[in-house]
Amino acid sequence: MIRSFIRLRDVRLVRYLLASVGALAVDMGSFLLLLAAGLAATPAAALGYCAGIIVHWLLSSRTVFHDGVLAKGAGRGRQKLLFIGSALVGLALTTLIVAVGEHAGIDPRLAKIVAVGTSFVATYLLRKVVVFGPQTAP
């Protein structure tokens, strides 16, 4: 069992999933707190997602794609901008899905769950291929 876990630890997608769980905890926690404070669902979803983005950069660049992180300098700055771009794609998807769900009368928490899955797939692919892909590796 431990040997299997050690092998799984080395799989990039599993590491990304674990980093995403941490970022999602911040995202959803913020979202639910903002909803409870009376903020409308769409801005609460956007703000929660933004908080999760910060956590995700820290975890992704240090534990998931560490071998693709460029050294400090112009290349690293470009890479951060690409990461933010991928996050904005996820943010747009999240905001759109929650807004459409809210307009359709769907519980915003359910819409947020759908948005999480959609955003996860889109941002993983963007980060794997574009942000930390071979063309950006040192």
Image (cartoon, helix red, strand yellow):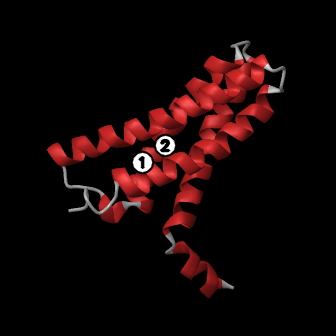
- The amino acid on which the numbered mark 1 sits, given as a three-letter code, is Leu
User: Which x, y percent locates residue 117?
Assistant: 66, 46
- Quadrant housing the N terminus: bottom right
Question: Where, by quadrant of the figure, is residue 23 drawn?
Answer: top right
Residue in the image at 33% along x and 59% along y: 133
- As measured in the structure, the alpha-carbon distance from the residue carrying label 2 to the one carrying label 1 is 5 Å
Indicate the secondary structure of the residue bearing disc 2: helix
Callout 2 touching callout 1 (CB < 8 Å) = yes
- The amino acid on which the numbered mark 2 sits, given as a three-letter code, is Val
Horizontal arrangement in the rendering, residue 67 relative to residue 8 (left or right): left
Residue in the image at 81% along x and 21% along y: 104
Image height check: is 49 above or below 11?
A: above
Residue in the image at 84% along x and 20% along y: 105
User: Which x, y percent locates residue 93?
Assistant: 58, 33
- Quadrant housing the C terminus: bottom left
The tag on residue 58 is 1
User: Which x, y percent locates residue 127?
Assistant: 42, 51
Image height check: is 10 above or below 2?
A: above
Horizontal arrangement in the rendering, residue 69 relative to residue 50 (left or right): left
Residue at the disc numbered 2: 55
Indicate the secondary structure of the residue bearing disc 1: helix
Does any portion of residue 118 appear in the rendered image? yes
Image height check: is 62 above or below 3?
A: above
Horizontal arrangement in the rendering, residue 95 relative to residue 131 (left or right): right
Does any portion of residue 34 appear in the rendered image? no
Mark 1 Cα-neighbour bin, 10 Å: few <14, some 14–19, many ≥20: few
Mark 2 Cα-neighbour bin, 10 Å: few <14, some 14–19, many ≥20: some
Question: Where, by quadrant of the figure, is residue 38 drawn?
Answer: top right
Horizontal arrangement in the rendering, residue 108 relative to residue 25 (left or right): right
